[in-house]
Amino acid sequence: RFFVALSGGSTPRAMHRTLAQEPHLSEIPWHGVHLFWVDERCVPWEDPASNYGAAREDLVGRIPLPGKQVHPMPADVVPEDGALEYEGELARAFPLAEGHEPVFDLIFLGLGRDGHTASLFPGHAALEERERWVVAVKGGDPDMHRLTMTYPVLNRARVLVFMVSGKDKAEMVRTILETPGGPLPAQRIRPVDGRLIWLIDREAASFLSSHQSLA
């Protein structure tokens, strides 16, 4: 089995549509893939703001993935109840030893202009969460209720991939990559025993020094 967690936003949508086309459609062993979501807005899945709704349109509805292996966050319940429900979903899906966190094979993350990632926003109490795997938060643009995975899960992944595009993210990309270890939510993605990869388009990398842009 291969466990993947997806993020929302506009940047990954092209990747999702590409994966649902040949040659990737036939090359990927979908029968072993389990899809989860890093975060979700508390709106119906039919709402244009829904991360799962977008992924269902671009990817999930186009690939031969058994329904029991698709694990969207609950969006139609009280946010705190939804967070607890999704923790239970993680506990059931992963073969966990007592006291251990889920270990994803691959997690995709985005980056906000304010340095947030997932739905972990600057100054929010969720940044200090060390026990819960999923929490309810309120914030972002638009300011709304959301569910998000926390650092105890995110930083346990075997591979974490930031996908960042657009000139409006260039200043934040430079801040994060040139001053590692800072307090911004995205800077606190520090894999315990995994790899951190940045996939950045030319515009998002435009404020980096030349040697960083070529790395």
Image (cartoon, rainbow, N blue to C red):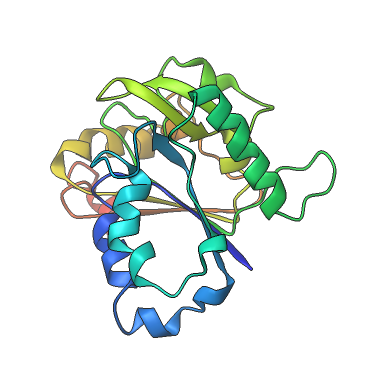
In the rendered image, the residue lying farthest to the right is 98
Q: Is residue 22 left or right of residue 193?
A: left
Residue 178 x, y percent position in the rendering? 36, 36
Residue 208 figure quarter: top left
On screen, 27 above or below 20?
below
Q: Which residue is pictured at 61% across the width and 35% down the height?
A: 85
Foreground of the two, 77 or 168: 77
Residue 199 x, y percent position in the rendering? 33, 56
On screen, 115 above or below 73?
above
Q: Is residue 205 left or right of residue 215?
A: left
Quadrant of the rendering where the C terminus is positioned: bottom left
Residue 195 x, y percent position in the rendering? 55, 55
Residue 60 figure quarter: bottom left
Labels in figure, total:
0
On screen, 39 above or below 13?
above
Residue 211 x, y percent position in the rendering? 28, 53
Asked whether residue 47 is in view, the answer is yes
Q: Which residue is pictured at 61% across the width and 23% down the height?
A: 129
Foreground of the two, 2 or 193: 2
Asked whether residue 215 is in view, the answer is no
Quadrant of the rendering where the N terminus is positioned: bottom right
Q: Which residue is pictured at 37% across the width and 40% down the height?
A: 177
